Every structure is written in C-alpha cells, then in structure tokens.
Image (tube, helix red, strand yellow):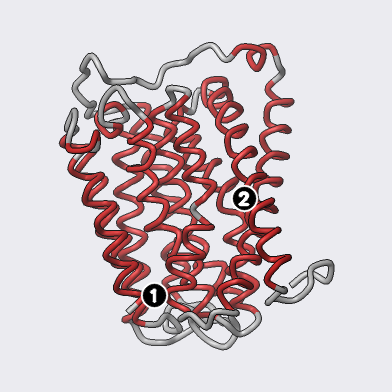
Amino acid sequence: MPDFLPSVPWPLLPSVAVFLVGGVVTIIGSIRLVALGDTLADRTGWGEAVFGVVFFGVATGLSGIVMTAVTASTGHPELGYSNAVGGIAAQTTAVAVADAFYRRVNLEHAAASLSNLLFGCLLVALLSLTLLGSFTPDVTVWGVHPISVVLVACYLGGLRLIRTAGTRPMWNPVGTAETRPDVPQQHGVLDRQATSVLWTRFALVGIFVAVSGWAVSLAAESVVETTGLSTGFTGGVLLGIVNGLPETVTAIAAVRQGAVTLAVAAVLGGNILDVITLVVGDVAYRQGSIYHAASNDDLLITTVGLFMTTTLLGGLLVRQACGWGRLGFEGIILVGSYLGMTVLLAL
C-alpha cells in the first residue's frame, strides 16, 4: 500500500467520512464520464458499445485493479479474488436499476445490438475460463498460472473479433419504434472541442474516479474488518457494491441522456475488466495461483455472475417490451439472483 495512505483498517469515523465523500466524488465523476464518452464514441466512430466496454471498463475498473494487486501482493489472494469477481454480480444488477430509470420501454429492448451481445458472450467465455482455472492443476510458470495467459489471449482476440463483426455485421436486431440505434448525436459545447482535449478530460476524470473508488474501497474494507464478517461476504457483497458504484452511476446517467447502448456496454465493460483483473492479481501473488486461492464463496460468486450474464444475454435477445414493475423478465431474475447470492453468503 502506498506510504501516503495509512494502513487498513482505519478508525470507524474517518472510514465513514472517506466512504461518503469518495462516493459523492465517484458519482459526479461517473456522470461527467458519460457525456465525454458519448461524444468520443461518436467522434472516433467506434460506437457506444465498443467505447463503453473498452474505455469505460478501464476508467471505472482501475481502482479495482489496484485493490486486487495490493491485496494479492500482500498475501491475501482470497480477498483479491473476491474483490475482482464480487463487483460482477453487483454491476450486472445495475442494468436492472438503470432499467427502472428508463421509463419508455425495457432497457434491453431499446439497447439490443450486435456488439452488446458479442461482448456478453465474451464475458461468459472469460468467466468460464476463470472457473476452469480453479479446477486445473495448481501449476505456475514464473509465478503465473497458464489460464491467465489464456484469459488475456481470449480478451484480445474477442475484441478484435467483435470490432471486425461490427464493420461487416451478419446479424442485426429488428428495429421497433422504441429501438434506440447507436447513431451520432449533438453534444452541445463538447462538439466544439478538439478531440485531444476530450481525450485529456476523459483520462483526467477517469483517474479522478479511479482514485475516489479506491479510497471508497479502502474505507469500506476498514468498516467491514471491524465487524468480523467473512471474506466472501465482505469481498463479494459489500466491496462488490462499492466497486460496482461507478458502473451503476454510469449506466443510470447514460440512460437519462438517452445513450442506452452505452449504459449496457459500460456494465459489460466493467465486468470484463474485473475478470482481467484476476490476471493482475495472479501476477502480483507470488506464492502460487490466485485461482486456487479462491474459496467456495468466491466460486459461488463467480458462478452467479456467469448465470446473471447469460440472463442478461437472454433479455437482449428476447427484447421484452415491458414486464412486471417496469422491468423485463431478466431484470426480475437479476435482482432475485443477487439477493439470493447475498443471503447465501451471509449464512
């Protein structure tokens, strides 16, 4: 841990203060990221889905990468693992939360796109490989488990495949009156700024959000350590909610601005980067494989994340226009799955 921060746990009152202040900063920064990211997605021609998954994933997931690297390198690989996968379930539930803020129609109906579907498939593949790593022999090469190399190769290959598929699509969702295609829009004063200026502002706000998110994570860790809660519940639920805060705020802000494709892509991007974070943790943990340090609770969280991702993919394919409580069937299942996981971890 850097010398400019006192070691965890902190006293309760400063922890709560940092948690609240950092949370507010994270919310404000995430909202600003949406406006800048939507403009850059149109300016670069990459589209909301690709830009959201790649760049929003990095901007909102950087604090999680640092936390996993720190915990793994200091001899707490189980907390590093749960910190990485714990946010996936919380962030996927954020789609249902953002759906509740989109009053026109079910969010998955409006945001269905080839890119979002393919990114969801990539996330399923990465989560499956993560589980596979825990069941393969505990062998490392230069301190790194072979599944880490496979994860990076799958991630890079998946990005290339999805980018290529976007230029020559062989499948497109059926357009309806409520479908919101990803087309360039007006962004006010941002359209008059140079691309280099937009990139600089996006990077600075992203770093600001990452530092705030990291501080919030440390504060949350201090609070939960004083309560004696289990590592699985701490990392999988409490820290998972904290780590999922930027993606949740980003999804809601994107929906409010009409960037529905970006809303779903930001969640998928954060989840994909959380899986890649395990590679960073595996490299940082020099005593063995981080995948084999995972507890049964950690494997449960990973499995629930896999189930929730396939549920989200089902919602993007079925595209139910409206369901109970203004949520589609997938939204109800996502919320129910997360609550069920929380109960199991709390027992």
Residue 128 in the image, given as x and y percentages of width and height: 30, 65
Q: Reply above or below: 57 against 254.
A: below
Residue at 29%, 64% (x, y): give it.
304
Q: Amino acid at mark 2?
A: Gly
Marks 1, 2: nearer the viewer: 2
Q: Secondary structure at mark 2?
A: helix
Quadrant that contains the N terminus:
bottom right
Crowding near pointer 1: few (<14 within 10 Å), some, many (20+)?
A: many
Q: Secondary structure at mark 1?
A: helix
Taking 302 as reference, is 251 left or right?
right
N-term-proximal mark, 1 vs 2: 2
Q: Quadrant of residue 301?
A: bottom left
Res. 23 mark: 2
Q: Residue furthest right?
A: 4
Residue at 47%, 67% (x, y): give it.
149
Quadrant that contains the C terminus:
bottom left
Residue at 42%, 51% (x, y): give it.
91
Q: Reply above or below: 162 against 197.
A: below
Mark 1–mark 2 Cα distance, whole angstroms, equals 25 Å
Residue 156 in the image, given as x and y percentages of width and height: 46, 51
Res. 318 mark: none
- Tell me if label 1 and label 2 are in contact, CB under 8 Å: no
Q: Reply above or below: 10 against 194.
A: below
Residue at 66%, 34% (x, y): give it.
202
Is 194 in front, or is 310?
310
Q: Amino acid at mark 1?
A: Asp
Is 88 in front, or is 134?
88
Q: Reply above or below: 281 against 57.
A: below
Q: Which residue is mark 1?
A: 298
Crowding near pointer 2: few (<14 within 10 Å), some, many (20+)?
A: many
